[in-house]
Amino acid sequence: MAEHNITVVIPMAGLGTRLRPHTWSKPKQLLYIAGKTVLDHVLDSLRSLPDFEHIEWVNIIGYLGDQIRAHISHHYPQLHVDYVVQAEPQGQSHALKLAEDHLRGALLVLFADTLIETDFSFLSNEEADAVAWVKAVPDPRRFGVAEVDERGWVRRLVEKPNALDNNLAVVGCYYFREAQALLAAIDTQMRQGLRLKGEFFLVDAINILLQQGLRMRTQAVDIWLDAGTSDALLETNRYLLDHGRDNTSEARHRSRVTITPPVYIHPQAEVEDCVIGPYVSIAPRCRVDRCVLSDAILEEDAVAKGAVLHRTLLGRRTNVILSPKSLNLGDDNVIES
C-alpha cells in the first residue's frame, strides 16, 4: 500500500448517554480501563495497519471534543490528524458527510466504543471493494448482522434481525477501497430520507452500495469488546487485565499492600495499607489508603480512603473518604450499611 493511501475515520461525536454521569464531563472515549483510555486501546488495535505512522487520521468530534484534541496532541504528536466537528447528533452517515473534504481513496471507519483484536496488515493486498468485520454471536437479535451468499459475499446488512439463523454480528469496523463511492451512497441515503429516530445510519448507505453491486466480504475478529456502558467497561477491564495489561509483578513491591491479581496500578498512584484486586485499575496520581478494592476502576487523581468498594467506577478527582467507626455491641446485634 502506498504511503498516505488510507484514511482512518473515528466518529466520536456521540453524547455517551449510557455512560453518565461520567460523560457529563468527558467524552466516553477518554474513560480509563486497564492502564489507558478507551481511545488509546482503540489506537493500539490499529497499529497493524500498513504504514501506521503515515496514515491520515480524521477524528469526528462533538460534545467536549476539545478534550480529545488535547489527548491526541499530547500522547500522539507524531500522527497527522484532522478534526471535523459534528455539532448535532444526526448519525454516522451524517458524520462522514461532514468529513467529505478529507476522504479520498481507501477508507477505514472504526467506531470508538468498540475494541477489537484483529490483524489489519492484509489491507495492503485487499482485492474486495469493501470489508465488514464480524463476530459470530449466540444471539444476533440485538446487533446488526451481515447476510452473506454461498460465495461469502455480503448481500445486505440487517439491523436487529428477528431470526437466529444468521449470527455474523457487525462490530463497527468497515473498510472501503474508494471513499467517493461511499460518499455518493450517503448522498443517496440523505435524498431518500433513510434515517432511524432522526439519525442517518451507515448501514443504510452500505446497503445502497450493495444494491449497486459492491463486492463486500466479511473478516472475522477473535475478540470484540464493548465500552459503551458502565457494566461493559468493567467487563472489558477484566478481559484486558486477564490478557496482558496486568502489572502485578511491579505493583506488589509496594509496602503494606496486598494484591490479588490481575490488577493495574499506575506507578504514579499512591497506594498504602490496602487490599487490591482482583480486576482493579488505578490511574495516575490516585491516592488510595486503607481500602479494600475489587472489580473497580479509579480514574486520574481519584482519592479513596477507608472504603470497601466492589464493581465501582470513580471518575477523575472523585473523593470517597469514609471515617473509621468504633463500635461497642452486645449480643444479637445486626449492623448493615
Image: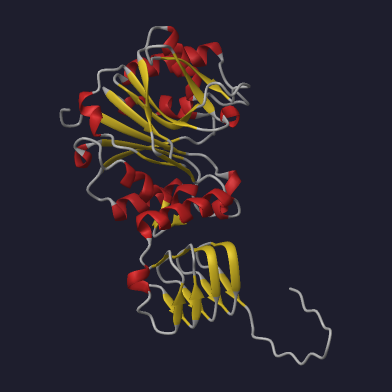
Q: Is residue 156 left or right of residue 36?
A: right
Q: Whole-percent x and y of residue 210?
A: 42, 12
Quadrant where the N terminus is found in the figure: top left
Q: How is the structure coloured here?
A: secondary structure
Q: Whole-percent x and y of residue 21?
A: 60, 54
Quadrant where the C terminus is found in the figure: bottom right
Is 171 above or below relative to 312? above
Going 57% across and 47% down the picture, which residue do you hit?
229
Q: Whole-percent x and y of residue 268?
A: 36, 72
Q: Is residue 255 left or right of residue 277?
A: left
Q: Residue furthest right?
A: 332
Going 24% across and 29% down the picture, which residue do you hit?
122
Is 126 above or below relative to 114? above
Looking at the image, can residue 62 be seen?
A: yes
The quarter of the picture where residue 263 lies is bottom left
**Is 73 or 122 nearer to us in this picture?**
122
Q: Residue furthest top?
A: 212
Going 25% across and 18% down the picture, which residue do you hit?
127
Is 337 above or below relative to 122? below
**Is 235 or 111 nearer to us in this picture?**
235
Q: Is residue 210 left or right of residue 137?
A: left
Looking at the image, can residue 267 be seen?
A: no
Number of numbered discs visible in the structure rendering: 0
Going 38% across and 16% down the picture, which residue do you hit?
152
Q: Residue furthest left?
A: 2
Q: Whole-percent x and y of residue 22?
A: 56, 55
